Amino acid sequence: MKVLLMHPVTSFDTGRPRQEGGEDLVEDLGLQRLFPAMAGGDKLALAVAEAAVLSPLKSIEEIAWRQQVLADCVTHPALPSQLYALAGEAIESHKKLTFWGLSRSPESLRYYSLQALETLLGYLAKLRRFALDHAGEVTSPGFRRLFSMLSDELDEAYLAELRAHISELKLSRGLFMSAALGGANKGTNYMLHRQPPRGFRQRFSERGTPRYGFDIPERDEAGLHALAELQERGVNIAANALTQSVDHVLGFLSSLRTELAFYLGCLNLKGALEEKGEPTCVPVLLPPGTAGLSATGLFEPGLSLSLTERVVGNDVEAVGKTMVVVTGANRGGKSTFLRSVAIAQLMMQAGMFVAAQSFSAAPATGVFTHFKREEDRGTQGGKFDEELRRMSRVISAISPGCVLLSNEPFGSTNEREGSDIGRQVFVPLAGAGARVFLVTHLFDLAESLYKMGSGDYLFLRAPRQQGARPFRLVEGAPEATAYGGDVYRRVFGKEPSDEALAGGPVSSPANQNGRT
């Protein structure tokens, strides 16, 4: 029995290998703010959220499978939560019985497994009843398949047969077994058998049939031990089969709980965003290999959840663009935009909704980030060396169809050298089929990319309006200004002169007093 709510073919595993550079994604994108919002304090939901987002799906069919299951969960939010609670209750009930499994003898395993199966059988019956009651509410292939499996494979006849086997294996009428003689007259091929029926006819027909037996004296410890050993050999195969059955049922319940935790995490995040009035949407999947993206109202969900007010979203039309270059004012929303693009791509490929009014993009073969970092004194070499090492790791792992988001790369060296390296890195990557999103303060780099005149590049700019920051990017060519006028107004409290903006000598009260 497989759950298959997360994937049409395979079960979801929180320990599955994650894409290379996953730790960089968490640090660069601030995902540590997103995952707890999904988990809602549930440790399992936290682990599942991290595993799902950091192991992006690459197939449109696989992503659509999760989208459809999530749509059922959004329409009927009580459905996943009730199933999750039922599976969790069954697992907790089993945990209370594990004390009996501390001894690994066949007889102990038989006793423990029978109690566990009897307990879990009641929950399997509840799951079947739940599936029958709610089968008409769901439309996704994932839920319909799950409910069909529960109702068909766990029908009343099957459950009755299981109860009969459990009753028989309690051995209330004693042990009925056979064995054969092996080498040196040692017993072999021990086999446990069903007790023969004991109706009136059977008892009547047995009259006169010779019966053989023996009694063991109460103080014959060796004899009692030998008899117990024979009994354990007889129940050994049955005990192992019972244990495997318990493990199978527990595996199914655990898998059900794990996969439902993902959808509950999605509902938690969606509810938190909607409570703030933030939009969410089901992303449109473009054909594989399509460059760029299209979005309206795109925002960073983690930032929104960390603020009391709503955040400003961005509109971008970049379908067919292999490189998007963002320049402009400091603290104008460039890095936030970059994070919102990456998070939207990851959420889409996890089968989730996206934090935007609308979003469409093609699945990427991988998502990689290269963001500027604070200098680490424990790092061997300088900050520039550390940047180059991280970029080298990204280039080694990247392939056509990947998305690379780079935030202010090579700013730790001079502009000419940084720009030259940037051209040698980003232009070939974009030309080889990677989708590049670049935020840079290197005007030499941005201007040279703009002058290439490639229709495959889109240029966005973070403007300022009379010193204010609208945090909304606009399409436009890179500008050489560093917005020094804003700094001048803040320091001197007045509008700068043309001479000051041109870099000439500035007269201040300190200068007039002869102080430097």
Image: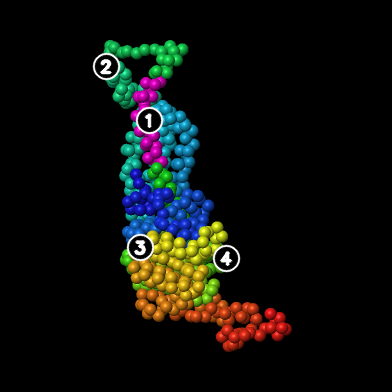
Instruction: Indicate the amino acid at tag 1.
Output: Ala
**Residue at (33% x, 46% y) in the render:** 149
Considering the numbered disc 1 on the image, is that residue within a helix, a strand or a loop? helix
The first of marks 4 and 1 along the sequence is 1
**Residue at (35% x, 72% y) in the render:** 320
Closer to us: mark 3 or mark 1? 3
Q: Are marks 4 and 1 in contact (CB under 8 Å)?
A: no
The crowd level at tag 4 (other Cα within 10 Å; few <14, some 14-19, many 20+) is few
Residues in magenta?
A: 228-250
The reply to whether the magenta stretch includes residue 503 is no
Residue behind mark 2 = 205
Closer to us: mark 4 or mark 3? 3
Residue behind mark 3 = 399
Q: What is the CA distance from the residue labelled 3 to the residue labelled 2?
A: 80 Å
Mark number, residue 43? none
Q: What is the CA distance from the residue labelled 4 to the residue labelled 3?
A: 40 Å
The first of marks 3 and 2 along the sequence is 2
Instruction: Indicate the amino acid at tag 3.
Output: Ser
Q: Are marks 2 and 4 in contact (CB under 8 Å)?
A: no
Considering the numbered disc 4 on the image, is that residue within a helix, a strand or a loop? loop
Q: What is the CA distance from the residue labelled 2 to the residue labelled 1?
A: 33 Å
The first of marks 3 and 1 along the sequence is 1
Q: Is residue 363 above or below residue 233?
A: below
Instruction: Indicate the amino acid at tag 4.
Output: Thr
Position of residue 210 measured from the top left corner of the image (x, y, whole percent):
29, 12
Residue behind mark 4 = 308
